[in-house]
Amino acid sequence: MPRTRRPYSAEFRHRLVELVRGGQSPEGLACKFEPSANAVRNWVVQAARDDGRRAVAAVASVTRWSGPSPRRWATTWVSHSILGSAS
């Protein structure tokens, strides 16, 4: 059974975020404390979003494909390649 650890407390995450904002690197904090540098960076980004310092990434609008269907495109390509090699 895999080992799991309890989530870090909000106070602990807040303290590490403040240390990064104060000038310490996430890599340095990762050496001193248990969470990885990537986790600390993620916490800093999330804290910036929560504080309104960073905009949430907009999701690209989904558009319907208006070209030929992929199956038709593949069939056309195969027929062209067969006819091209026959001549």
Image (tube, rainbow, N blue to C red):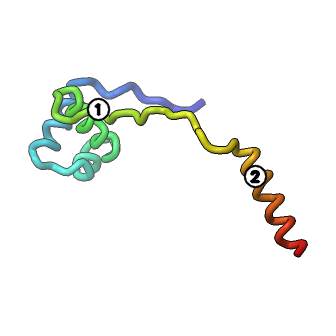
Residue pictured at 44% horizontal, 33% vertical:
61
Q: Which of 4 and 86 is in front in this view?
A: 86
> How far apart are labels 1 and 2 at the CA level?
38 Å
Q: What residue type is labelled 2?
A: Ala
Residue pictured at 31% horizontal, 28% vertical:
8
Q: Decide: marks 1, 2 in contact (CB < 8 A)? A: no
Mark 2 falls on what kind of element?
Answer: helix
Q: Which residue lies furthest to the left in this view?
A: 22
Q: In this view, does 72 lie above or below 77?
A: above
Q: Which of 77 and 60 is in front in this view?
A: 77
The quadrant the N terminus occupies is top right
Residue pictured at 23% horizontal, 38% vertical:
44
16 left or right of 71? left
Q: Is residue 86 above or below residue 42?
A: below
Q: Residue furthest bottom?
A: 87
Badge 1 crowding class, 10 Å Cα cut-off, few under 14, some 14 to 19, many 20 or more, is: few
Residue that carries the numbered disc 2 in the rendered image:
74
Residue that carries the numbered disc 1 in the rendered image:
56
Q: Earlier in the sequence, mark 1 or mark 2?
A: 1
22 left or right of 83? left
Residue 51 position within the rendered picture, expressed as x and y whole percent measured from the top left: 17, 27
Q: Is residue 71 above or below residue 46?
A: below
Mark 1 falls on what kind of element?
Answer: loop
Residue pictured at 51% horizontal, 34% vertical:
63
Q: Which amino acid does label 1 sit on?
A: Val
Quadrant for residue 6, please give it: top left
Which mark, residue 38?
none
Residue 76 position within the rendered picture, expressed as x and y whole percent measured from the top left: 77, 54
